[in-house]
């Protein structure tokens, strides 16, 4: 079985934000699971970065809008006989549940986490280059000596206000990524271009490249078309160059 490396290009700011948050959710889960004193600061960095998103913009409203938009679109599919009605019903029910949870949550997401004094102290020190040393923040140095179970409990408590946000964004991106099938494409001499159907609400371009290929795609997208230029860079000290051989890859144009 061929292994593939995947690359994604969001076509609007909303999906771009969701992808960044998805990466932060995964970062937190990975490092909180491992739980060492080296992992804990990175897990905290993920929480503080998530807080930056929730405090600078109304991310809850953006997630609600996208959930409701997807829900409305999917409801129309219920009339099509070729659709798996059981699976669709389950998905619609999950979306309805998430919409209800987000609507019932009052105030800004993460308000409880913002009140954690130790976390705020770490956020302030993170603006200084380099790691937080014991002379920077003795309270944090002391916290890192606590039992791993205690530290994990605190981390989970700080992260808990974002669990509904994580579930909602994960659902949105899963629906989007599974909204279409892959097509087999070839980039002639490393270049590929395709016109976007304006009748579709295309939000994401997903490309899968065999892991054996010694090149990677750079995706440039606009409202009416997108292009893929495959690049090669065997020496990281030099500029990447366009790969001048034909490249076979899988393309998925995601719209809901």
Image: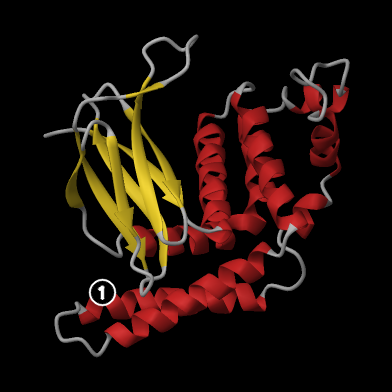
Query: In the figure, residue 90 lies in which quadrant?
Result: bottom left
Query: In the figure, residue 220 lies in which quadrant?
Result: top left
Frontmost residue, 83 versus 145: 83
Q: In this view, does 240 lie to the left or right of 12?
A: left
Find numbered disc 1 in the image and state the secondary structure of the residue it sits on: helix
Residue denoted by label 1? 87
Q: In this view, does 35 lie to the left or right of 230?
A: right
At 47% from the left edge and 80% from the top edge, which residue is drawn?
96
Badge 1 density bin: few <14, some 14–19, many ≥20, Cα 10 Å: few
Q: Which residue lies furthest to the left in this view?
A: 1
Q: In this view, does 90 lie above or below 128?
A: below
Q: Where is residue 100 in the image (x, y as percent from the top left)?
A: 56, 79
- Residue 150 visible? The answer is no
Q: In this view, does 253 lie to the left or right of 114?
A: left
Give the quadrant of the C terminus. Answer: bottom left
Q: Where is residue 165 in the image (x, y as percent from the top left)?
A: 58, 61
Query: In the figure, residue 225 lies in which quadrant?
Result: bottom left
At 62% from the left edge and 46% from the top edge, which residue is drawn?
156
Q: In this view, does 177 lie above or below 148?
A: below
Q: In this view, does 235 lie above or below 151?
A: above
At 33% from the left edge and 87% from the top edge, which residue is drawn?
76
Frontmost residue, 122 versus 24: 24
Q: Position of residue 14 (x, y in %)?
A: 56, 60
């Amino acid at each position: 079985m061929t292994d593939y490396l995947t690359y994604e290009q969001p076509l609007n700011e909303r999906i771009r934000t969701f992808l960044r948050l998805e990466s932060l959710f995964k970062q937190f889960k990975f490092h909180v699971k491992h739980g060492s004193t080296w992992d804990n600061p990175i897990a905290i960095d993920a929480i503080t970065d998530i807080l930056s998103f929730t405090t600078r913009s109304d991310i809850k409203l953006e997630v609600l809008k996208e959930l409701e938009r997807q829900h409305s679109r999917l409801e129309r599919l219920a009339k099509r006989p070729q659709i798996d009605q059981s699976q669709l019903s389950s998905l619609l029910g999950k979306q309805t549940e998430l919409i209800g949870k987000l609507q019932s949550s009052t105030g800004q997401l993460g308000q409880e986490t913002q009140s954690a004094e130790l976390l705020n102290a770490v956020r302030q020190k993170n603006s200084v280059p380099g790691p937080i040393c014991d002379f920077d923040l003795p309270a944090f140095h002391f916290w890192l000596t606590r039992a791993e179970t205690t530290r994990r409990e605190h981390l989970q408590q700080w992260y808990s206000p974002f669990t509904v946000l994580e579930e909602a964004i994960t659902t949105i991106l899963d629906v989007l990524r599974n909204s279409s099938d892959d097509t087999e494409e070839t980039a002639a001499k490393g270049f590929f271009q395709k016109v976007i159907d304006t009748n579709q609400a295309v939000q994401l371009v997903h490309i899968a490249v065999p892991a054996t290929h010694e090149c990677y795609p750079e995706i440039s997208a606009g409202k009416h078309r997108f292009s893929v230029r495959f690049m090669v860079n065997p020496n990281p000290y030099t500029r990447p160059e366009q790969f001048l051989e034909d490249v076979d890859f899988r393309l998925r144009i995601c719209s809901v």
